[in-house]
Image (spheres, grey):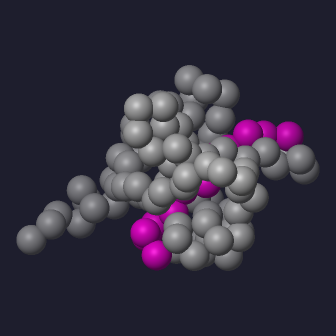
Amino acid sequence: MEDKKNRADWIYAVVCDPGPGEHFFGLHDKEQDVDFIPAFNSREDAADCLLTLPRERGRKYEVQAVHIDELKEIAEKNGFVVAMVDKDGHIIK
């Protein structure tokens, strides 16, 4: 049985162009003037929200599980923050 603590450390994010040149999908909030990577509590929420996110034509997008600490580190190195988002695209944390 999977430990709840370990499960809570994993979230879901959208990856652009999966493979060797992949990177996490990021957005910019004009009101707060902040770049952020939307993260989700479940794969289903991420997949539902992906349908409404602005995407570039010709790019491939994929939902992947990622450890929260790894995502925060990558975001920080690239001038982003991680924002927890619900399936409707609203920031919840």
Q: Is 36 drawn above or below residue 5 in the view shown?
A: above
Q: Residue at x 41, y 39 (%)?
A: 19
Q: Quadrant of residue 5?
A: bottom left
Residue 75 versus residue 2 in the image, above or below: above
- Residue 77 position within the rendered picture, expressed as x and y whole percent measured from the top left: 56, 23
Specify the farthest residue to the front: 58
Task: Determine if the magenta segment contains residue 26.
Answer: no
Q: In the image, 22: left or right of 66?
A: right
Which of these two is toward me, 24 or 32? 24
Q: Is there any visible trace of residue 92 in the rendered image?
A: no
Is residue 39 visible in the rendered image? The answer is: yes
Quadrant position of the C terminus in the picture: bottom right
**Which residue does the image show at 24% across and 66% down from the upper left?**
4
Is-magenta flag for residue 40? yes
Which span is picked out in magenta? Answer: 33-44
49 up-or-down from 81: above or below: below
In the image, residue 22 above or below residue 44? above
Image quadrant in which the N terminus is located: bottom left
Q: Along the horizontal axis of the image, is 51 left or right of 28?
A: left
Furthest residue in direction top, as rendered: 77
Q: Position of residue 23 (x, y in %)?
A: 53, 37
Would you say 85 lies left or right of 28 here?
left
Residue 30 in percent (x, y) is at 89, 47
Residue drawn at x 43%, y 70% as measured from the top left: 42
